[in-house]
Amino acid sequence: MRVEVEGRISALDTSARTVVLRGVTVSHAGNVSYVVGSAADLALNRQLAVKGRLAADRSHVDATSIHIEL
């Protein structure tokens, strides 16, 4: 299932390569296209727009595209 999530980063785990937006965990560990910015630009309270797919176990979203408001 394709999903889109927008919001500010409320939690960030650089080791696991995940962020939390509006209570939704988003993984950016796979093949992600950064429309604006890069993984190095991810920081708490930064605004993101994410497109991705809901994981099979529905525990998180696997990002395919991330737009960072710099």
Image (cartoon, rainbow, N blue to C red):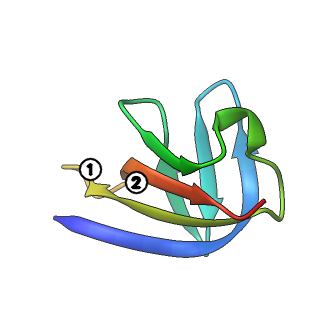
**Could you tell me which residue is drawn at 47 percent across and 62 percent down?**
50
- Residue lying at the far front of the rendered structure: 36
Q: For residue 30, which quarter of the picture?
A: top left
Nearer-the-camera pick, 54 or 33: 33
**Could you tell me which residue is drawn at 73 percent across and 46 percent down?**
42
Q: Are marks 1 and 2 in contact (CB under 8 Å)?
A: yes
| Residue 21: assigned label | none
Q: Secondary structure at mark 1?
A: loop
The residue where tag 2 is placed is: 60
Q: Is residue 62 left or right of residue 17?
A: left
Q: Position of residue 65 (x, y in %)?
A: 41, 51
Nearer-the-camera pick, 25 or 38: 38
Nearer-N-terminus badge (1/2):
1
- The quarter of the image holding the C terminus is bottom right
The residue where tag 1 is placed is: 55
Amino acid type shown at disc 1 = Ala
Inter-mark Cα distance, 1 to 2 = 6 Å
Q: Position of residue 17 (x, y in %)?
A: 59, 33
Nearer-the-camera pick, 30 or 57: 30
Amino acid type shown at disc 2 = His
Q: Secondary structure at mark 2?
A: loop
